[in-house]
Amino acid sequence: MYKTLGNQRLVYRSLIASYVKAGLVDQAIQVFDEMSQSDCRVFSVDYNRFLGVLIKNQRFELSEYYYNSMNPKGFSLNSFTYSRFISGLCEVKNFELIFRLFNDMDSLGIVPDIWAFNIYMNLLCSERLVDDALKVFELMGERGREPDMVSYTIIISGLCRVKRLDEAIEIWKFMIKKGHKPDNKACRALVLGLCDSGKVDLAYELTVGDMREKIRFSAVIYNVLIHGFCRLGRINKALAIKNFMRRNGCEPDLITHNLLLNYCCNALMLDEAEKLLVKMEKSGMQPDSYSYNELLKGLCKANRVDRAYMLLVNKMEAKGFADVVSYNTIINALCKAGRSSNAYKLLGEMKRKGISPDVVTFTILVDAFLKGGNSIVAKELLDQMTMMSLFPSLALYTTIIDHLCKTGKIGMAHGIFRDIMGQKIGPDVVSYNALISGYCNAFRVSEALCLFEEMQTNGLCPDEVTFKLIIKGLIKEKKLSLACGIWDQMMEKGFTLDSYLSETLISAVNSK
């Protein structure tokens, strides 16, 4: 009989394995249920294999169900299956079950594999639960799983992310004291954290300074340091690192050169930037679109827009680097220089060359023409955007409405306001305030009141500015009782009227 049951168990196991191999997990579950309810004896190994399948397929609710049903029968998972379970739960951030599994393992004297500890610590750090990650880090040693380089890197990165830099440095030094040789990932975690907080000298000292004979640093480490020194305006130190990396067998890459190029262009060291581009090309390091766009930005920033345009048409277009970013840079520079008509011509040139303008292009031009008092062209640009299925931001819409109201074109402003109503973004309180202000200034406070009611119907709460605009408009039109009523509403909402308006209203009511 035992032999028969043993054979039957082998049949069940074989059937489950074949269903799993074919990706038919539901059928495998059904067979496992049949097996566990039959007279066949089920072993821990069966639960370990079966739960492993469920975990691999992210069937975590079922995994928990079978785990719960397994324990009363005296079965347990092995370290590997527990580790897989914890790792899988980390993907769905099921902290409650992870914590329970750790407790169960502790009571059974089972220790998770080191990679499970690392995955869990990484999740905790990504959720900014660094103190919990540190507890797990300490627990590893207590349970006989000494932290490895990955463990240290996760903790150092997590501490840097929450700006606990002193603790990160302490862990770094402890890691080296324990005899671990930092790899490039560990160095990158520390260098990024310190440089991001402006501690570039310290980042250099702890890595390239102290470990130069022990580690072959990657270009990434050098580039982070170069970027950090450039941000501090210490170009000489950045250039020294570039020379140092070459002497130590790490050739500067495109990112290295682009970082230096970015610094030169921002500092308006344009001759140096152009020389750097030439050096790049001579050394076989071909500049990319970013490289040329940086030089383009530098030329525009220095008000050398015509030269920037020549760079665009003579060099960038020939290399296929001219894009919408390039044109936006020059269009913006032309508009700032008061050459909106030239900028508008570039819009047409873009289209002819097959470069589609984006929301940024139109926003720059609309804003420029509004400031120049040409609302007709601004409206035309807005219509072009709509035809191209490009929709302005709410901030741009509000700017246009505000400008039109201030120039007396309230009808046009209200038309654009209704355009917003028909789009997904919808107007906000600031948009309403811009149009309400226009109506109040034009002595059309009744229409402003309609908007005041409409915004509340649409679920928007008037702010202090809204109330003041309405009250000021009502005072202008001598509608004092209405103004007092709005004032009462304002106070109910917790807003206060400034002394000038309140005194004006009280004085007008008393003199009536």
Image (tube, rainbow, N blue to C red):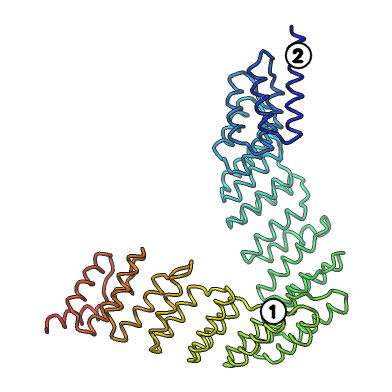
The percent coordinates of residue 226 (x first, y second) are: 73, 69
Name the quadrant containing residue 449. Answer: bottom left
Q: Which mark is residue 329?
A: none
**What is the x, y in percent for residue 377?**
52, 88
Residue drawn at (76%, 10%), measured in percent from left and top?
A: 4
Q: Which residue is mark 2?
A: 6
User: Would residue 356 be found to the left or right of residue 395 on screen?
Assistant: right
For the N terminus, the quadrant is: top right
Q: For this rendering, which residue is in front, 179 or 124?
A: 124
> Disc 2 on helix, strand or loop?
helix
From the image, which quarter does the C terminus lie in?
Answer: bottom left
Identity, as a three-letter code, of the amino acid under mark 1? Ile
Residue occupying the point 83% across, 75% down: 286
User: Mark 1 or mark 2, which has the lower sequence index?
Assistant: 2
Q: Amino acid at mark 2?
A: Gly
Q: Residues within 10 Å of mark 2 (few under 14, many from 20)?
A: few
Left or right: 47 in relation to 131: right
Q: Nearer the viewer, residue 397 or 258?
A: 397
Q: Which residue is mark 1?
A: 355
